[in-house]
Amino acid sequence: MAQATKYCVILTTCANREEAEKLARLLVESKLAACVQMTGVTSFYEWDGALNRDDEHLLLIKAPSSSYGEIEAFISHNHSYDVPEIIQLPIRAGSEAYLKWIDTVTK
């Protein structure tokens, strides 16, 4: 298992499948992310003083940590939410082969 603080997973949610797929595809095509996984989630949160429950699509974006700023700006610019979730989680360890692959497919 290789040490890997130079890699991260970035989380964001989208209101619909079309937006989630568009963001995922563009992040990979632009070589900002090596892989983006998408799954359905149910979110509970407070917004404008009201409790909300929404079905959303969660993106798990695997990328070099050095790309976080570009990815945050990309999501902010292309997202339909006023305040999209954009959270970076460090990858502390991982398969050396997988982490090398991230390096080869991202800029």
Image (spheres, rainbow, N blue to C red):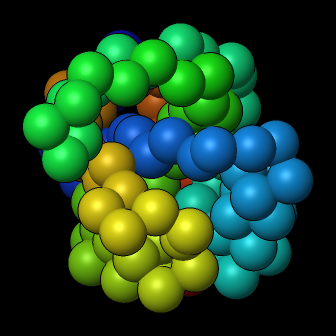
Horizontal side, residue 18 vs residue 101: left or right: right
Image quarter of residue 78: bottom right
In the foreground, 81 or 9:
81
Question: Visible in this render: residue 73?
Answer: yes
Measured from the top left, where is residue 15 in percent x and y?
A: 63, 44
Q: Who's the residue at 75% across and 73% down the image?
A: 26
Q: Who's the residue at 46% across and 63% down the image?
A: 81
Quadrant of the frame with the C terminus? bottom right
How many numbered marks does the figure carry? 0
Horizontal side, residue 83 vs residue 103: left or right: left
Quadrant of the frame with the N terminus? top left
Horizontal side, residue 62 vs residue 26: left or right: left
In the foreground, 92 or 70:
70
| Up/down of 83 relative to 61, above or below | below
Measured from the top left, where is residue 50 in percent x and y?
A: 23, 30
Question: Visible in this render: residue 103?
Answer: no
Q: Who's the residue at 80% across and 64% down the image?
A: 22
Horizontal side, residue 61 vs residue 104: left or right: left
Q: Who's the residue at 61% across and 30% down the image?
A: 56
In the foreground, 8 or 103:
8
Measured from the top left, where is residue 69 in percent x and y?
A: 27, 78
| Up/down of 39 relative to 106, above or below | above
Measured from the top left, where is residue 106 in percent x and y?
A: 60, 70
| Up/down of 96 relative to 51, above or below | below
